[in-house]
Image (cartoon, grey):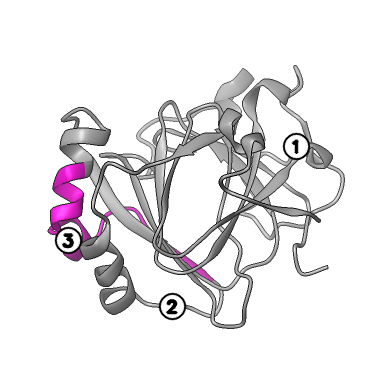
Amino acid sequence: MEIKKITDPAFRKYGRLVTNVDFTELIEALKTKTPLPEGVGYEPSVPALEATATAKQLKTITFGELPIEVGYCNGHNTKLNALEYHRNSEINVAATDAVLLVGMQQDIADDFTYDTAKVEAFLLPAGQAAEIYATTLHYAPCSLSPEGFRVGIVLPAGTNYPLDEAHKPGEDKLITAKNKWLIGHKDGGLDANAFIGLKGENIDIAK
C-alpha cells in the first residue's frame, strides 16, 4: 500500500506533529533502556522513560498537567492485525522510522465493524513525534526494515491496564483494557475474547 509522509496534508484529520517538546532524552532512553523483541512488545509505563525531562514536558505542556504514563511499543511488525482507540489523544515518539496505520472512528459501522480498505499508512521518521487524536483508529506501528521499530507511547495514566469490571453490550464489547476499545481482524492472532470486526484484508505493508 502507499505509505505517505507524516507531513502530508492527508494526516491532518488523524493527528499532528508535536514540535514544542524536546524529545532528545526520551528517544535516547528508548534506544538504550527498552528491549527490541522479535515480535511486538508493549509496556504502558516504564520508570526509566518517565524519569526523563521529556516526560515532564509532555505532562506539563502536551497533556495540560494531567497524570501520564510513558511506555513503549517495540519490535518487528508489518501487519495491521487490529485497530483500537481511546477517549483521548496518544503521543507516538519515533526512536526509529515507523509506519502508522490509521483510520477514523467515524467510519466504524453501527454494528462496530470497520472496512480495512479505509486504512491509510504514514511514515513517522526517527526523531519525530505525533499526536494521534482520540478519534483516530490505530494499533502497533510497523517496521520498514529488518532492524524493527522503537516507538514511545504516551497516554493518560492508567490506560491499557486490566479491567475491573465485565463489559459486554454495545460498544462496551470492544473494551479490552482500561481506556482501550479494540476491533480485531480474524487473522490478527488476537486473544479469543477480542471482538473481531475488521472486514477486508489484514493489511501487510511488506506486500
Q: Which residue range is magenta in the image?
A: 40-57
Q: How far apart are marks 3 and 1 (CA)?
A: 35 Å
Residue 44 visible somewhere in the drawing: yes
For the residue pair 44 and 173, the one nearer the viewer reads as: 44
Q: How far apart are marks 1 and 2 (CA)?
A: 30 Å
Question: Around disc 2, counting alpha carbons within 10 Å, would you say few (fewer than 14), some (14 to 19), or many (20 or more)?
Answer: some
At 60% across and 22% down in the image, what residue appears? 171
Along the horizontal axis of the image, is 4 left or right of 66?
right
Label 3 belongs to which residue?
47
Given this view, does label 3 or label 1 mark the residue nearer the observer? Answer: 3
Label 2 belongs to which residue?
36
Sequence-wise, the earlier of marks 3 and 1 is: 3
Element marked by disc 3? helix
Sequence-wise, the earlier of marks 1 and 2 is: 2
Looking at the rendered image, the quarter that the C terminus falls into is: bottom right
At 14% across and 46% down in the image, what residue appears? 56
Whether residue 138 appears in magenta in the rendering, the answer is no
